Structure formats: structure tokens, C-alpha cells
Image (tube, rainbow, N blue to C red):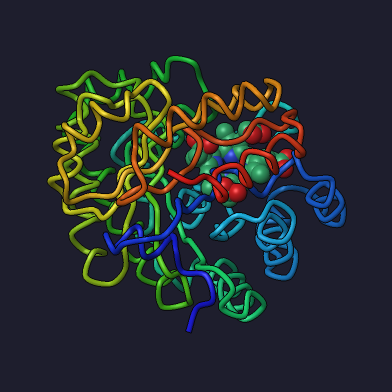
């Protein structure tokens, strides 16, 4: 029996007696404890590939911040690597790929990843599940096919992802070929994560907002739909498509249990769009946590009342920024947990 399964309950649409909360990027540089563990690894990739260290930083926010779920410490870029495109994480700059996808031969050379290729993540999940000792649920994740394809073509982060978008406009058939391989890999990976102990999973479509609405349906949602269909019989699944506010109704029609919202979306409007049969998650602007406690409390209360207590999981509208004060994060988490409607 899980001691605190309030996040899972909310995801499944069961009644809860308070609002559950976890935070995207809750394991990270805001915690001195994270920085200390990270310093024990040679670099970010070695860190991600070390199940003991990954387990340690996955549990830190549960102990330190008091969140109601743990999210496995890893990265969405483990999928391109498992398919044959290794990456580096350059300090203060972000991801960088030596090889990128340019033509059909490049796509043909990619493998469809299996759980076996990502055994280090599965080991980290098994270990974390054991160490958590059923205190809170463990969340697994992957990147959405569009966000993954964007990195595989662009080769790094970008403000515009114009190379990736150019590929969609000029080589749509090849793009679909690549999307198909990424989707199959992601399904294998999420299934393996659930088998290894993930109680629920989330798809991160961080670059959704860079596509037009029409492109989003054709190149992004189509494949998210395939993933949700394969995974929903196995575990609750959340779709977080940043800045795709126009797509909430269509996302809810995939049958996902939860939709993650960024801060540009009004909670009441999101509820109308998404309907009653899905849980909403979000959507505090991480920058609110730079404000004083009074402001955090005031804005959070408005948000909580707008979402309501049921079918809701409190979170941010995107990940925590590294320079946010951990005491403010603790204040925010306690405020939500203690809030009485
Ligand atoms: O706590 C958690 O949320 C779990 C861990 C997690 C990480 N990355 C660890 C990480 C998760 C869920 C991710 C997902 C991820 N990775 C996304 C989707 C979510 C989002 O933020 O939009 C994306 C786009 C990536 C790719 C990525 N990884 C980038 C662009 C960067 C560099 C930017 C940065 O913050 O430095 C990373 C690195 C990364 N992944 C860090 C962490 C904790 C920071 C690296 C470090 O410790 O030096």
C-alpha cells in the first residue's frame, strides 16, 4: 500500500481531501544537495547513467521540499542516444549533438530503442522504487516525438528550431519516417519504465509552441496519440504540451488521464476546453517564486480556487529555474498542501 498516493488518485479522477503537488525540475540546481551529488559524477551524462546517483537526487525533493511524487532523474535526450545519436550536455549552454539527422540514410541508420538500450534508467527506477518504500508515487517520462525530433535535427537548443521546422516543410515524408521511429522507441521505453516501477508517466512536449496549429496536429499530436493509446491501459499518462493552448480539447480526446498546462492558460478556460473527464496539472509561472511570500500566497490562492480541489494536480507551468530560492519553493509547496477551500 502506498502511504501517500494523492497524486495518483487525482490522476485517476478519484476524490482527494487536499490538492496534490509535485514540480517539474524539482530535482535540480535549486538544491545544494543536488549540486553535491552532481559533483560526484564526471559530467551530466555519467550522472544520468549512474543509478545510485540518479536515485539519490530523485528522492531529495521528496525529503527536502515535501512534494507528493518523485520524478525519476534522467533526461528526454536519452532516447536520441539510444537510437544512435549521442549527445553532450555543455555547461551553461545545454545539449549538443555531434551528429544530426539530414537525410533518409541518417534516419535508416537509427535503431528503434528498446527498454534494454535504456537499462540504466530502468535500474535507477527499480532502485528508487525500493528506496522510496512506497512513500509517494514514482513518475517516469519521455520527450514527445516532436520535441525529440527537433533536437535530433537541430543538434542543440534553439529559439526558433528553424532547421527542424524547415525539415517538416521540405521533407514531410522523411519527417514522418523519423517520427514513427521515435514514437516506437518512446512506447518501448515507457512500457519498460512502467514494468520497472514507474506508477505513472508524463510526455514532455517542450517545443510544442513553436509549431503552427495545423502542423501541431499533423506532426505532433498524431504521435502523442499513438503513445497515449499504447500506454493508457498500463498506467496514468500526462501530456504536457507547452504553449499548445489551442490543442487542449484534442489532447483530452487522446484519452490521457492528465493534461499539463503552462502559465499562459487560464484555468477556467482550460477546464471548459478539456472537459470534465481529465485531470489538469499546472500552472504557476516559475517566476512567481521570485516574489515575496505574500505575493506567492495571494497568486497561488487565486489559481487553486480557479482549478478547484478535484481532478487537479498542482505544479508549475514549466520547470523550476536554477536560481529560484529553495525556501520559496518550500513555502509554495506547504501553502498548497495546507490550503483549505
Ligand atoms: O526533476 C525533474 O523534473 C526530472 C529530471 C529532468 C531533467 N530533464 C533533468 C535535467 C526532466 C524531466 C528533464 C526533461 C527535459 N530535458 C526536457 C523537457 C522538460 C523541459 O524542461 O522543457 C528538456 C527540453 C530537456 C533537455 C535539456 N536537459 C536541456 C535543454 C537542458 C539544459 C538546460 C538546463 O536547465 O541546464 C537539460 C539539462 C538538465 N536536465 C538539467 C537537469 C537537472 C540541468 C543540468 C545540470 O545539472 O547541469
Q: Nearer the viewer, residue 38 or 334?
A: 334
Can the viewer see residue 87? no
Q: Nearer the viewer, residue 304 or 11?
A: 304
Residue 43: x and y in percent read 77, 48
Residue 327: x and y in percent read 77, 38
The quarter of the picture where the C terminus appears is top left
Indicate the quadrant of ligand 1 in the picture: top right
Q: Nearer the viewer, residue 107 or 265?
A: 265
**Horizontal placement of 228 versus 185: left or right?**
left
**Horizontal placement of 311 versus 229: left or right?**
right
**Horizontal placement of 118 versus 106: left or right?**
right
Q: Residue at x 56, y 66 (%)?
A: 121
Eyeballing the image, is 40 above or below 219? below
Q: Residue at x 31, y 68 (%)?
A: 235
Residue 50: x and y in percent read 71, 65
Eyeballing the image, is 95 above or below 336? above
Q: Residue at x 73, y 70 (%)?
A: 52
Q: What is the quadrant of residue 290 in the picture?
A: top right
Q: What is the quadrant of residue 265 in the picture?
A: top left
**Horizontal placement of 19 versus 92: left or right?**
left
Amino acid at each position: 500500500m502506498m502511504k501517500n498516493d494523492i497524486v495518483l488518485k487525482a490522476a485517476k479522477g478519484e476524490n482527494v481531501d487536499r490538492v496534490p503537488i509535485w514540480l517539474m525540475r524539482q530535482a535540480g540546481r535549486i538544491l545544494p544537495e543536488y549540486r553535491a551529488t552532481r559533483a560526484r559524477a564526471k559530467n551530466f551524462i555519467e550522472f544520468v547513467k549512474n543509478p545510485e546517483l540518479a536515485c539519490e537526487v530523485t528522492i531529495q525533493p521528496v525529503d527536502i521540499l515535501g512534494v507528493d511524487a518523485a520524478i525519476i532523474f534522467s533526461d528526454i535526450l536519452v532516447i536520441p542516444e539510444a537510437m544512435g545519436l549521442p549527445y553532450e550536455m555543455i555547461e551553461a549552454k545545454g545539449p549538443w549533438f555531434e551528429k544530426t539527422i539530414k537525410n533518409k540514410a541518417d534516419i535508416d541508420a537509427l535503431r528503434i530503442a528498446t527498454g534494454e538500450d535504456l537499462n540504466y534508467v530502468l535500474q535507477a527506477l527499480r532502485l528508487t522504487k525500493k528506496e522510496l518504500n512506497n512513500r509517494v508515487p514514482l513518475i517516469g517520462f519521455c520527450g514527445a516525438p516532436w520535441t525529440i525530433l527537433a533536437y535530433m535535427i537541430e543538434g542543440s537548443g534553439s529559439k526558433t528550431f528553424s532547421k527542424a521546422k524547415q525539415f517538416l516543410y521540405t521533407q514531410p515524408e522523411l519527417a514522418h519516417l523519423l517520427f514513427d521511429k521515435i514514437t516506437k522507441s518512446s512506447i518501448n521505453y515507457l512500457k519498460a519504465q512502467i514494468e520497472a516501477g514507474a506508477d505513472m508517466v508524463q510526455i514532455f512536449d517542450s517545443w510544442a509552441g513553436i509549431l503552427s496549429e495545423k502542423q501541431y496536429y499533423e506532426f505532433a499530436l498524431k504521435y502523442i496519440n499513438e503513445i497515449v493509446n499504447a500506454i493508457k491501459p498500463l498506467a496514468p499518462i500526462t501530456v504536457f504540451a507547452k504553449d499548445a493552448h489551442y490543442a487542449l480539447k484534442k489532447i483530452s480526446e487522446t484519452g490521457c488521464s492528465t493534461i499539463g498546462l503552462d502559465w499562459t492558460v487560464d484555468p477556467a478556460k482550460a477546464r471548459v476546453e478539456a472537459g470534465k473527464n481529465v485531470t489538469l496539472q499546472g500552472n504557476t509561472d516559475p517566476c512567481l517564486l521570485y516574489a515575496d511570500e505574500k505575493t506567492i500566497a495571494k497568486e497561488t490562492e487565486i489559481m487553486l480556487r480557479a482549478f478547484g480541489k478535484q481532478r487537479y494536480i498542482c505544479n508549475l507551468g514549466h520547470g523550476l529555474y536554477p536560481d529560484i530560492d529553495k525556501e520559496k519553493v518550500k513555502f509554495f509547496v506547504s501553502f498548497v498542501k495546507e490550503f483549505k477551500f
